[in-house]
Image (cartoon, rainbow, N blue to C red):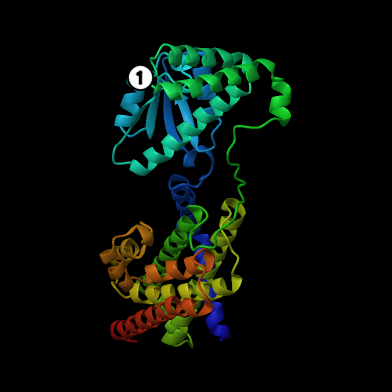
Amino acid sequence: MSVVLILALKDLKQLVRNRMGTFWIFVFPVVMALFFGAIFGGSQSGAANRLSLVVVDEDGSEASRAFVGRLRNSAALSVESRQRAQAHESVRLGKRSAYVVIPRGFGDSMPLFGGSPAKLELGIDPSRKAEGGYLQGLLIQASFEGLRDQFGNPSKMRPYVADSLAEIDSGQAGLPAGQQKVLTSFLKELDSFLGEVDPKAYQERGPQLEPLRIQMIPIAAVRATPRSAYEISFPQAILWALIACSTSFALALVRERSWGTFLRLRAAPLSRRQILQGKGLACFLAAITVILFLLVLGRLACGVRLDHPGLLALAIPCSAACFVGIMVFVSVLGKTDQAVSGAGWGILMIFSMLGGGMVPLFVMPAWMRTLSDISPVKWSILALEGAIWRGFSLSEMLLPCGVLLAFGACFTILGMLRFATTERL
């Protein structure tokens, strides 16, 4: 065993001295994790989750400006002001969710028991019915808040009451005589009330136009979803590091064979199995190191969860062992650097595309997710995500880890059989 360890340390020293090899194993995966994590929503809070709304204020009154201000204060909306043509174009091109036009005369509208209600023009894609209904509710809420504010300011409210009385008396409201009498009596009493009430006392202690007050209680739902895009991009980056690690050691073995180093090692009292074991141990240790490096970096820099160290302790060595087997298999795919590099990267790129190394597994179509079962990359990502955010139990982790070990054993056996037939020493 000491001989195997010495050979492994030799290979690790050679890896450290190879700057390009170190770059592809340690630096390139970090760049990928940060880059794709930032692209696919590394920041998922604030305005990114709001409904984008363009407001066209054609009224320009105090009431319309107050209405726009209430919309801007909504935590569910991201509001900007533009001209009508610009607003229409931004929604048509899909740059914004919707636009709302506040027409002229908005500030003069006060629907009580007569008159026309304030009108708004809402522009939205008809296919987005759910967002349209949600937005209408927010607009009604902002309008109701304005009505409440006006009731809290009697001096501004009384002219609207007077206009409603005049409209009822003139018969323009179109109400039956009995209803006109009832509403006239009510509005006169309301006008008397607004003339005598103390606005300060009304606002502090009086009845409020707030029929329902809801207390929001935040509850963090227990669900198998990533907290950020980095919890998806870092497992993918780990797989790219493992791919680079396996191909680097496979190329190192090919070079030793082509440069005569392997022959000199065989001339020493070393068996072919010991040499391969030393190479495999070096690849295994390098893989473990780069996985731990990326996980710790993801935790410290991007908040990637490491809440289940026991499950990670199971997923990490299984993934490393699988790619050690792939390393042994790739190393016998040719006799030159170019042949092994081309064949190895070609096979591993296909594994990566099928297994979620480029596109996350959960966004793939169903047929591709089924086909991805043949890729060890899929099972390695699944094991890592199961320990990070999928919430796997120990029994659920046994499947991906078992598949990884099976892949590793099969690739190792195939590689050693091929190696034995090509090396006649």
Towards the viewer: 189 or 133: 189
Q: Position of residue 347 (x, y in %)?
A: 29, 67
Place residue 250 in its image quadrant.
bottom left
Q: Position of residue 291 (x, y in %)?
A: 52, 65
109 in relation to 122, above or below: above
- Asked whether the viewer can see residue 81, the reply is no
Image quarter hosting the C terminus: bottom left
Please give the count of numbered marks on the rendered protein.
Answer: 1
Amino acid at dot 1: Arg
Residue positioned 73% across, 25% down in the render: 201
Residue positioned 40% across, 65% down in the render: 243
Towards the viewer: 260 or 377: 377
Q: Which residue lies under the disc numbered 1?
A: 84
Question: Taking 69 as reference, is 175 left or right?
Answer: left
Residue positioned 50% across, 53% down in the render: 230
Q: Tell me the crowding category of disc 1: few under 14, some 14 to 19, or many 20 or more residues within 10 angstroms, Cα based.
A: some
Question: Taking 52 as reference, is 345 left or right?
Answer: left
Q: Position of residue 339 (x, y in %)?
A: 28, 66
Q: Position of residue 87 (x, y in %)?
A: 36, 24
Image quarter hosting the N terminus: bottom right
For the residue labelled by badge 1, is the local secondary structure a helix, a strand or a loop? helix
229 in relation to 159, above or below: below
- Asked whether the viewer can see residue 254, the reply is yes
162 in relation to 271, above or below: above
Q: Residue furthest front?
A: 178
Towards the viewer: 143 or 55: 143
Towards the viewer: 376 or 65: 65
Q: Residue furthest left?
A: 367
